[in-house]
Image (cartoon, grey):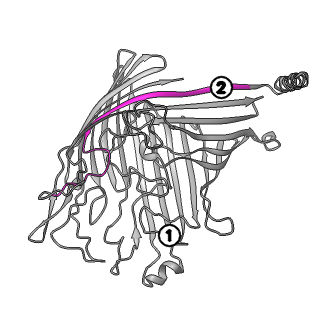
């Protein structure tokens, strides 16, 4: 017993001396939030139920009213040593619906709680690079971290990687290597993203920037668009320019990105289909938001425009029925860009509640259209702050469809059947609709904010859907009731 106590005392003394010699500052930050959603025809692509006989389980929520509550927390611990190195461990916990079934992740809202709903979101090391930092401030971050390049427009994803950040004169640089997929150790079947971003903050009140991202897909094709055969490969890249800041009284945020690439089919794929071509990809997206403040006291007036190319659904399938050419603007694999920003409240996800939206979303292992691909919009908005704790914003926007020979979201069929290489057999509409909305941000206390708002979308023909029925061989399509949403969020940040 005495020996045990002696060893314990010695260990405590060693730890105490180590802490004294290498002082570490610990910090924590994060948030806890509760959100509500009440909506119709939002939360995913609408599908009509058959008009004649609905088979069991066919209810898709078409024209239904839905309501729910969810909860999330995020907690990030940071240990920092002498301003040169730090380590971060970042946790997240979710209830995707209050009262949900206790069947796996994101189910903290199950009755009796005590669920396995805490996730390890990020953990990484961040440190000042010795030697290089003598010439230019240089830091390196390695581990599971947030990969962000113009998060409202192109890319945000948590994942493993290495990021080097440095400054040369007025130019800041970020160099990226991230690992979306690791295949077999002895095969060239990995997925890697390489990239660079440079920007010059505060250049005459503006911040111009540019970036280049390259996805080398050893066995990681764009599965959102084509069927993935074994050992298929791909090369995809994004080139972007942006400009933020103020030009006189005008606050500006603007983005442009071009996307291109090719999926190379393997011999295993072409053996079963010798006529299959290597699918080509290419598209572009554009976004700009400009606003002026206090020309009228306490008021901000602004406008926004965005455009993302869509696919031509005839070109996506050639005359032999093979995937061929895709011209929709796509975001990198797994990007959570669709959930970020505040473009609207019904069709696009909002900052109040990203759990309600109708726009396309990218899945975790695919590169999809994101929220912008296949659509465009023009928007006008105005915000009024008064009293100090209340900010109210109203907006109106027109949303259009850029997919050709079909629609981005709706799948209404034409009276004429599809002819591969010549027609898609789908109706082609350009009108998603007109959306109007209003929302308020209420500062209850310094760290406690309540946001509430609503939006209404006057639905256009591009949202029409095929019911699954035909009459005398003619497809029966249905138009949705106008979608709407009433959303709220109560959030405490620390």
**Mark whose residue sits in front, 1 or 2:** 2
Q: Residue at x 35, y 72 (%)?
A: 315
When asked about the image quadrant of residue 58, the answer is: bottom left
Q: Can I make out residue 137 in this image?
A: no
Q: Which residue is mark 1?
A: 262
Label 1 SS: strand
> Is 486 inside the magenta-drawn segment?
no
Q: Looking at this rendering, what residue extends furthest in the front direction?
A: 1
Going by the picture, which residue comes out furthest to the left?
Answer: 472
Q: Which residue is mark 2?
A: 27
Residue drawn at (34%, 49%) of the image: 359
The picture places residue 262, in percent across and down from the top left corner, at 50, 69
Q: Which residue occupies 75% across, 41% down?
A: 136
Highlighted magenta segment, given as a residue range: 25-50
**Percent x, y for residue 229?**
49, 72
**Residue for point 40% across, 40% down:** 289
Marks 1 & 2, CB-CB < 8 Å contact:
no
Q: Position of residue 54 (x, y in %)?
A: 17, 56
Residue 447, visible in the rendered structure: yes
Q: Quadrant of the N terminus?
A: top right
Q: Earlier in the sequence, mark 1 or mark 2?
A: 2
**Picture layout, residue 130 above or below residue 234:** above
The number of numbered badges drawn on the structure is 2
């Amino acid at each position: 017993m005495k020996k045990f106590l002696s060893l314990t005392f010695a260990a405590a003394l060693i730890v105490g001396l180590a802490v004294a010699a290498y002082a570490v500052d610990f910090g924590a930050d994060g948030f806890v939030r509760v959100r509500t959603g009440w909506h119709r025809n939002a939360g995913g692509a609408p599908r009509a139920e058959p008009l004649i006989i609905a088979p069991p389980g066919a209810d898709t929520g078409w024209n239904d009213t839905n309501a729910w509550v969810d909860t999330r927390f995020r907690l990030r611990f940071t240990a920092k040593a002498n301003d040169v190195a730090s380590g971060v461990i970042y946790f997240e916990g979710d209830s995707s619906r209050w009262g949900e079934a206790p069947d796996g992740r994101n189910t903290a809202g199950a009755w009796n709680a005590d669920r396995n709903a805490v996730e390890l979101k990020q953990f990484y090391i961040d440190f000042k690079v010795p030697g290089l930092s003598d010439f230019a401030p240089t830091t390196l971050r390695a581990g599971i971290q947030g990969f962000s390049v113009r998060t409202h427009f192109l890319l945000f994803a948590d994942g493993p990687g290495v990021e080097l950040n440095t400054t040369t004169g007025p130019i800041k640089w970020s160099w990226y290597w991230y690992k979306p997929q690791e295949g077999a150790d002895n095969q060239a079947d990995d997925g890697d993203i390489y990239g660079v971003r440079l920007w010059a903050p505060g250049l005459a009140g503006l911040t111009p920037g540019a970036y280049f991202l390259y996805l080398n897909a050893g066995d990681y094709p764009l599965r959102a668009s084509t069927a993935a055969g074994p050992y298929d490969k791909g090369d995809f890249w994004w080139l972007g320019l942006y400009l933020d800041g103020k030009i006189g009284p005008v606050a500006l945020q603007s983005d442009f990105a071009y996307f291109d690439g090719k999926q190379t089919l393997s011999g295993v794929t072409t053996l079963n289909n010798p006529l299959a071509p290597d699918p080509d990809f290419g598209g572009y997206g554009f976004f700009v938001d400009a606003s002026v403040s206090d020309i009228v006291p306490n008021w901000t007036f602004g406008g926004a425009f965005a455009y993302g190319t869509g696919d031509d659904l005839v070109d996506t399938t050639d005359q032999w029925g093979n995937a061929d050419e895709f011209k929709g603007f796509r975001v990198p694999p797994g990007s959570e860009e669709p959930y970020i920003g505040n473009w609207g409240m019904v069709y696009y996800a909002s900052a109040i509640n990203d759990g309600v939206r109708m726009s396309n979303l990218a899945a975790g292992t695919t590169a999809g259209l994101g929220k912008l691909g296949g659509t465009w919009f023009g928007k006008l908005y105005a915000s009024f702050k008064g009293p100090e704790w209340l900010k109210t914003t109203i907006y109106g926007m027109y949303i259009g469809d850029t997919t050709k020979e079909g629609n981005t979201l709706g799948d209404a069929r034409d009276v004429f059947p599809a002819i591969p290489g010549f027609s898609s057999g789908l109706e082609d509409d350009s009108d998603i609709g007109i959306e109007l909305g209003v929302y308020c941000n209420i500062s209850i206390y310094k760290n406690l904010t309540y946001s509430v708002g609503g939006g209404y979308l006057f639905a256009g023909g591009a949202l029409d859907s095929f019911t699954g029925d035909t009459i005398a061989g003619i497809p029966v399509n249905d138009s949705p009731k106008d979608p709407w949403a009433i959303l709220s969020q109560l959030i405490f940040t620390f």
